[in-house]
Amino acid sequence: MLLGVDDTDSPSGGCTTHLLTDLVGLAEDHGLDVLGDPRLVRLNPNVPWKTRGNAALSVRFGSGRGRSRTIGELHGRPVRAFSSGRAPADRVVSEFREAAWELVRSTARPDEATDPALVVVSRALPADLYRAAVTSVVDPESVERRLASVGAWWRTHRSNRGIVGAAAAAAWPGRRRTWELIAYRSPTASGPRNVDAASVRAAARREPSLFLCHDPRTRRLMVAPHTPCPILFGLRATTPEAAVRARPQIRSEPVDRWLLFRTNQATGDHLRGDPTFPLAKFTPARFQGVVLAPPQSLRGGHVAFSLSGPGGTTECRVFEPTKVLPPIARSLRPGDALVVWGGTGADPVFRVEGIRLVAHSLAPTARLPPRCPTCERRARSLGTARGYKCPGCHRRWPPEAGRPVRQPPIVPLGTYHPTPSARRHLAPRGPERSPGSD
């Protein structure tokens, strides 16, 4: 029995991952075991109706077989997961899913326009449901038709928008994955979280598999959220063992419970490499193009430039909070070839989330002033398109008298990501560099 759940939180509070820990406790009360990893699945980050991180959750329950491993702690008892197991009896499935839906409804923020949804299926849903939800905008009615065709059971409250994420979480193949261990604070705790930054940095040094723990450029601690939710801290890692080992190394206020999730974070799954142009609203993508004109510096430290790509000309924009990307964008020259990734919003402007410089322009980028044959002195430029003048005898030359020369590139070829605190959950990991790192 596989459950998918989504849309129980709001910008002012709540947490669907915390709800999943309650569903695990409810399953224990019904004699059910966790099979495999609970899953935290991020969806299209560009959709306008997301709450915070646009995550949906799924978990498989049954009667566990063989060896188990600890994946969390709930009510002072370890949560154990089995790698395989038997499907529960139909009566148990029927009783549990009704109890689970009542828990989902009662947990969803009552004062907000949340659209909670719960999906229950006997096996994983087709993977294309996940791919659609992470790369585009999906019509909920189309998802309900797919669920009906495979005999799924589902419930929604208010609108049916939450069905998209719940189904996508139950459809994620989970092969490209990372892990996140999420620790929760006491239900009575409020105010700023007490998480020791030095212990987080030390844990990251001891466990190289941990990533996005802190941002040395902005000095921001990234494991602890600043939103009104019950999460105390989250440890992202490329291996589950590293996250579990690091948890007791973090000095913090008391941990009420914790759970380890398999996630699609840092996989870049949302970035389609073959997007259809012109890009539709709220569409993430990755594509290659050639810079058409010198970039423009905008108010606030942002940068705009145009790329000639497979779909014609695309207007791109880099924003100041990414820190690393604006100086890269300002260094671009007409003819430079690069790969960009990011997405569109309600307008067609492509918001850049990363840049890979593929090739520098071979075209001349400057003109060397002529040398005066009389004074043997180098002429001086009089300004753009105004020509040159000898500082000695004052002889003048037209602009075309300057010899075209290539200037060395300002930044080397390579891949450039935003500063860690400005990255999206799904943003791909990989070799990184900053301006002047060579």
Image: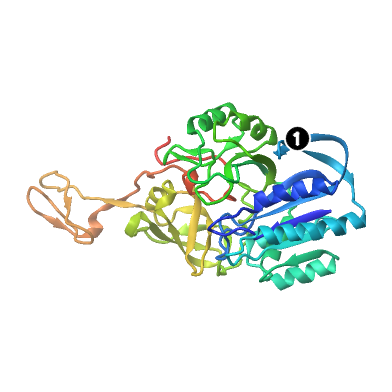
Instruction: Examine the image and state in which quarter residue 169 appears.
Output: bottom right
In front of the other: 32 or 319:
32
Can you say which quadrant of the picture contains the C terminus?
top left
Name the image colouring.
rainbow
The x, y position of residue 174, in whole percent, is 73, 48
Q: Left or right: 210 with respect to 262?
A: left
Can the viewer see residue 312 in this picture?
Answer: yes
In front of the other: 121 or 388:
121
- Residue at horizontal 77 percent and vertical 49 percent from the top: 26
Q: Label 1 amino acid?
A: Thr
- Residue at horizontal 61 percent and vertical 51 percent from the top: 268
Can the viewer see residue 128 in this picture?
Answer: no
Crowding around mark 1 (Cα neighbors within 10 Å: few <14, some 14 to 19, many 20+) is: few
In front of the other: 4 or 74:
74
The x, y position of residue 95, in whole percent, is 85, 58
Q: Say which element carries label 1.
A: strand
- Residue at horizontal 56 percent and vertical 64 percent from the top: 310
The x, y position of residue 124, in whole percent, is 81, 55
In front of the other: 163 or 33:
33
Residue 326 to residue 347: above or below:
above
- Numbered circles on residues, count: 1
Q: Left or right: 297 with respect to 119?
A: left
The x, y position of residue 270, in whole percent, is 62, 56
Q: Which residue is mark 1?
A: 70
Outermost residue, front side = 188
- Residue at horizontal 91 percent and vertical 57 percent from the top: 91
Outermost residue, left side = 393
